[in-house]
Image (cartoon, grey):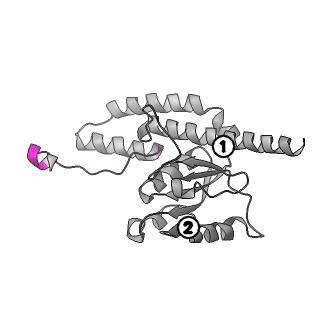
Amino acid sequence: MLARRCGSELVELPLPLGIRATDEWLDSLERLAGRKGGDSSSYRDRHLGRLARRMEWLVPFVFQHLDAGFIGDPVVFAGIKELLEFVGARIRFAVITNRKEHAKDLENLDGCPPILVWPTQLEIHRFLEGLLLAEEAEPMPGLLVTNNYGMSIAYPGMAAFEFGFPSVFRHCLYPRPFLGYQGALALLDGFANAVRAEEVNRLRYKALLEL
């Protein structure tokens, strides 16, 4: 409606969630604006350089070879998957809490994990039990990125980071982006802190048992 009133061209682009998606978003805007190189490249280099410096120690000691899971909206799944893979982690499973028509394109993603779409809470538990508790299952994922539907799912050693709609257990009392390069840094910061907090909880529980 706004584009029609202004007589402007309407441009629809995917969410710039994750590094690659933000790169593509900037490239698309630059192309549509008729610019060739320069502005977006310097902006990208500046932000990626800052991100690389801040992630230097977290990547090898927190994220590399970390297994993760996802429960939430299909519109953010691809970005979360790409962001975790960018720092050396891997998504082992995804539960989509929207209707099937909203998730129809997800299985076309490269390296798409097993996906459960529009389940009940009981179906989520059965799906995860089959994947994570089977005799031949790989070690438990260390991180679950989830909306509030997954916050009640408790597996030993799996940290939970609440993200997406609905979100009722996590508060943001100051501007905390999740889109663009700054958003990628904020999300990775949250993921890393969740994983470390779970490690502390395990150590405290172990110490309690040894009393």
User: Picture coordinates of residue 149 (x, y %)?
Assistant: 53, 58
Q: Main SS of the magenta segment?
A: loop
Does residue 38 appear anywhere in the picture? no
- 139 vs 65, nearest the viewer: 139
Crowd class of label 1 (few under 14; some 14 to 19; many from 20; radius 10 Å) = many
Residue 112 covered by magenta stretch: no
Residue beneath disc 2: 121
- Where residue 32 is drawn, which disc sits there? none
Tell me which numbered mark, 2 or 1, is placed earlier along the sequence.
2
User: Residue tagged by mark 1?
Assistant: 195
The stretch in magenta equals: 4-18
What secondary structure is found at the residue carrying circle 2?
helix
The quadrant of the rendering that contains the C terminus is top right
Residue at mark 2 to residue at mark 1: CA–CA distance: 24 Å
Judge left or right: residue 197 versus residue 151.
right
Q: Residue furthest right?
A: 211
